[in-house]
Amino acid sequence: MEFGIAAAAVEGQSESGDIHVMQYVRDRLLLAAIDGIGHGDSAAAAALAASAVLKANPSESLETLMQMCHDVLRSTRGAVMSLASIFPRLGQMRWLGVGNVQGMVQRAGAAKGTVQEVLLLRAGVLGAQMPSLQAATVPLRTGDRIIFATDGIRSGFVADLSSLDTPQRSADRILQQHCRSNDDALVVVARYLGNTP
């Protein structure tokens, strides 16, 4: 896998409530984009609490991780999150989203501004309202890119997605051109480099 990460805290705040997790465990990579509700210290505290759960339990199923985060976040302002378990040797990903952290897959060689898979987001807030959960499975081929973006990024960013850009260049460009000024923002771009022994 190859990654690009770009993030920004809302003006006037030292900490962002939008954070990512990348945790390898045995045959898979756990990848998450977490958005603490609101911004500032309280949002960051909620996001960090969820992050700690993921880092401590990376081998659990996505559904279990969501439930664990929901339980831990009851005493916070809550968070929304999209999660993926990527299995590089299988060329496969399972993903799941609660709230409004966008997730998509752009296939290798896809035309600029197009995505081929979109994560089905379930309405809810971890710590407050948990929807029914069922992760979806998506095949991955060499060169495919997985993109997560919190709601601090305007949804029209897809128009600028190019499968030819490096993940970091994509993440930087999306943040620069589509960041809302009134919210924390995070973009995670991961490119699958193929099945290597």
Image (cartoon, rainbow, N blue to C red):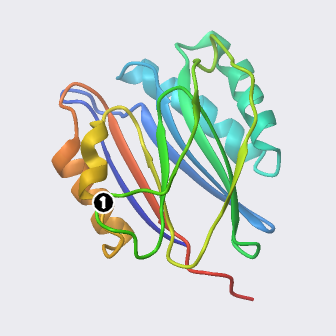
Of 41 and 159, nearer the camera is 159
Image vertical order of residue 1 relative to residue 175, above or below: below
Residue 184 located left or right of residue 173? right
Q: Quadrant of the N terminus?
A: bottom right
Name which residue type carries label 1: Leu
Q: What SS does tag 1 mark?
A: loop
Query: In which quadrant of the rendered view does residue 25 lie?
Result: bottom right
x%, y% of residue 27? 79, 68
Residue 134 located left or right of residue 95? right
Q: Which residue is mark 1?
A: 161
x%, y% of residue 155? 31, 38
Residue displayed at 58% across by 18% down: 125
Q: Total number of numbered labels?
A: 1
Query: In which quadrant of the rendered view does residue 10 lie?
Result: top left
Residue 43 located left or right of residue 185? right
x%, y% of residue 6? 33, 53
Residue displayed at 52% across by 13% down: 77
Of 107 and 47, nearer the camera is 107
